[in-house]
Image (spheres, rainbow, N blue to C red):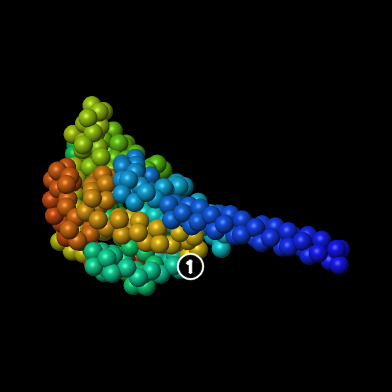
Amino acid sequence: MKRTIETNRAEAWLERGLRWTFALGLVLGVAAQATDTQAQEKALNLYSARHYQTDEALYSNFTKQTGIKINRIELGDEQLLQRLKSEGANSPADVVLLVDAARLWRAQIDGLFQPIQSKLLEERIPANLRSNDGTWFGFSTRARVIVYNKATVKPEDVDTYEELADPKNKGKVCTRSGSHPYMLSLIGAMVERLGEAKTEEWARGMVANMARPPRGGDTDQIRAVASGECGVALTNTYYWVRLVRSEDPKDKDVVAKVGFVWPNQATSGTHVNISGGGVARHAPNRDNAIRFLEYLASPEAQAYFANGNNEWPVAKGAELNNPALAALGSFKQENVPLSSIGKGQIAAQRILDRVGYR
Ligand code: FE
């Protein structure tokens, strides 16, 4: 009997002990989970191929507004897409920002985005600047224009993309690599407009007219036009406006020697492209990702994202707050859907390989 009482007592202690341990475990577990959820609520992993210093304010302003910390990974377009692919389902990426429709389209068909529904984005971003399946959204536009050396080239000889390939411009043309997204999109749009055969003829003419083999970025082309090494070159508008706004005497000298034309104003219009992004396929912080994209469509963020890098803001309600960019004036835009530019770049790359446009 005594033994039974003792056993019972011991059992009661044990039971109480277990109950406490269980309760304590539960409390700790819940606490751990809460910290976990909180951590999830307050972080955003951003994979960005944008390479513009002015984006800093864009990110810090988001954190200030929402308390969500941004962990940023910045890589070149191609490396970024490679990394996302190799990380697969384990990728920590929440938002992917890319420059150029060619890359956005590539990421879309490679399944690196997940479709989202956002009334706000659908309302603020024009339909022609986003994918039709909710995978990516454009947040700014840029145009691909022609710059020429004022001393050696007449603007009327270089005011269409097609003319750059004309024998009259032999030895004068400079571009960056043909395989760069900016060139692939331009040529992809051309395939849409003119067909593959005519575009190939054009690409052959371009190679025949080159002042030097393709190298460097867009700014390098503008500088080479100023120095006289090249007579004419292609550049995205924001590189030109950056030089126009520069206080550096060397840049001022470059701008003084270089002329600017909107290509194809009498015909198909100037090629326009976008910078944009979407929610990553396996985003661990999906809600924060959508919140960030919606933030990018706010007038405030548009000022950083677009104006800050001398691009045109696209969201409803956003203002162009950039006198140097505004001074370029308005122009006729090429009317080729961004989605077909994406598709066209595959044909474009084939053409470049055939004609030896490096
Ligand atoms: Fe760029």
| Residue 241 to residue 189: above or below | above
According to the picture, the residue beneath numbered tag 1 turns out to be 111
- Nearer to the camera, 317 or 7: 7
Residue 207, x across and y down, in percent = 38, 52
315 sits to left or right of 191:
left
Q: Residue at x 19, y 61 (%)?
A: 316
Q: Residue furthest bottom?
A: 133
The answer, for residue 172, to whether it is visible in the render is: no
Local SS, label 1: loop
Front residue of 295/145: it is: 295
Q: Quadrant of residue 15?
A: bottom right
Nearest the viewer among 66 and 311 is: 66
Q: Where, quadrant-wise, is the N terminus in this rendering?
A: bottom right
Residue appearing at x 16%, y 47% in the figure: 321
* Residue 89 locus on image (x, y percent): 56, 63
For the point 57% across and 57% down, which residue is it? Answer: 27
Most foreground residue, 221 or 20? 20
- Compared with residue 275, is residue 58 higher up or lower down, i.e. above or below? above
Query: Which residue of the protein is positioned furthest toward the front in this rendering?
Result: 1
